[in-house]
């Protein structure tokens, strides 16, 4: 399990990346220290934990304990939370430093409600988000088309009785492996990714090949109408193989691989920071 840390001024929040779960874990005591500046963050967390438990919150029971390196260089078990749990924890901390995060969460919640009422807003916000991150118009257009292609494929899987979650992930893995030569997890490792969306870190060529693979799988499925998971798996592999053959022909013509090890930061030379984005959005709302 990787254990990098995030710096906030003179404070550090210890984190751990669980590769199997593809999930970041954050040290609760460190989050409390940064947001409250309490002289005794462990005691603060102990009191807060008791209060949350009394309120019937499930946050404390779902909290994990992981070994993390302390200031003395040794590893001790410490309470840790996932990203979702950490954001819920922040909502329970009465602190000026926590307030921008609370306002951001409320803003995101409002936007999701608006998107439920008017789904077109989802596309508009996606366009705005990708543009803010520095993606070019051509890439954005391809990415939005890829989202539509993916939705058509998952709709077809649903019609064929494929279960959301693990079965979707297995079929996606087979398609990715068939066209790129790597599993989804292997592909993300190749690009140095962890929690990030793989498609958001693809070049235009990679996106197009992935779209071809998913479109081919959908079309074959619509023709053959597989009724078993193994049948859907066979279709997924064959669809991916069509894009894989196209990739190999293209690489033979240009003399090099089209599978890039670059991620979005390298492709666009953009480094985004959540706190800065929150502050900018809040300032914009005030105006």
Image (spheres, rainbow, N blue to C red):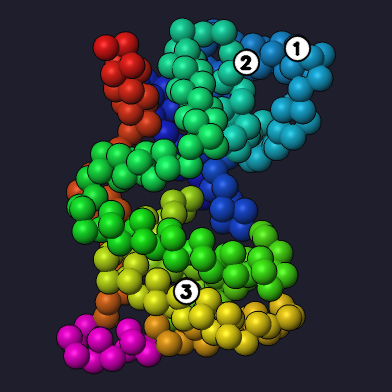
Res 214 label: 3
- Horizontal arrangement in the rendering, residue 100 relative to residue 204 (left or right): right
Mark toward the viewer: 2 or 3: 3
Q: Which is more N-terminal, label 3 or label 2?
A: 2
Mark toward the viewer: 3 or 1: 3
User: Could you tell me which residue is drawn at 32 percent across and 84 percent down?
Assistant: 247
- Name the spot of residue 185 as percent of width and height, x first: 51, 65
Badge 3 marks a residue whose secondary structure is helix
- Horizontal arrangement in the rendering, residue 253 relative to residue 95 (left or right): left
- Residue 90 picture quarter: top right
Provide the major secondary structure of the magenta segment: helix
Spatial CA span between label 2 and label 3: 43 Å
As rendered, which of 140 and 206 lies closer to the eye? 140
Q: Which is more N-terminal, label 2 or label 1?
A: 1
Q: Is residue 58 magenta?
A: no
Spatial CA span between label 1 and label 2: 10 Å
User: Could you tell me which residue is drawn at 55 percent across and 72 percent down?
Assistant: 173
Q: Where does label 2 land, which residue?
A: 92
Which image quarter is the C terminus in? top left
Res 51 label: 1
For residue 11, above or below residue 184: above
Badge 2 marks a residue whose secondary structure is loop
As rendered, which of 107 and 145 lies closer to the eye? 145
Q: Which residues are magenta?
A: 244-256
Whether residue 19 can be seen here = yes
Res 80 label: none
Spatial CA span between label 3 and label 1: 49 Å
As rendered, which of 44 and 91 lies closer to the eye? 91
Q: Is residue 247 magenta?
A: yes
- Name the spot of residue 273 as percent of width and height, x first: 33, 33
For residue 104, above or below residue 97: below
């Amino acid at each position: 399990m990787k254990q990098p840390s995030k710096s906030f001024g003179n404070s550090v929040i210890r984190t751990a990346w669980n590769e199997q779960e593809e999930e970041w874990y954050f040290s609760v005591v460190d989050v409390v220290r940064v947001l409250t500046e309490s002289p005794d963050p462990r005691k603060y967390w102990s009191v807060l934990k008791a209060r949350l438990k009394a309120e019937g919150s499930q946050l404390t029971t779902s909290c994990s304990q992981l070994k993390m390196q302390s200031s003395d260089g040794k590893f001790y078990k410490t309470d840790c939370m996932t990203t979702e749990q950490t954001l819920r924890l922040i909502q329970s901390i009465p602190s000026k430093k926590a307030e921008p995060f609370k306002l951001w969460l409320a803003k995101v919640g409002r936007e999701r409600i608006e998107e439920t009422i008017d789904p077109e807003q989802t596309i508009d916000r996606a366009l705005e988000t990708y543009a803010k991150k520095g993606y070019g118009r051509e890439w954005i257009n391809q990415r939005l088309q890829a989202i539509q292609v993916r939705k058509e494929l998952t709709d077809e899987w649903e019609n064929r009785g494929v279960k959301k979650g693990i079965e979707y992930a297995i079929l996606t893995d087979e398609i990715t492996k068939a066209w790129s030569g790597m599993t989804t997890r292997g592909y993300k490792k190749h690009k140095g990714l962890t929690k990030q969306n793989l498609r958001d870190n693809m070049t235009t060529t990679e996106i197009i090949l992935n779209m071809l693979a998913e479109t081919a799988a959908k079309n074959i499925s619509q023709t053959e109408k597989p009724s078993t998971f193994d049948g859907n798996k066979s279709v997924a592999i064959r669809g991916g193989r069509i894009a894989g053959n196209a990739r190999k022909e293209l690489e033979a013509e240009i003399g090099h691989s089209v599978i890039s090890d670059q991620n979005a930061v390298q492709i666009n030379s953009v480094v985004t920071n959540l706190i800065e984005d929150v502050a900018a959005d809040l300032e914009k709302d005030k105006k």
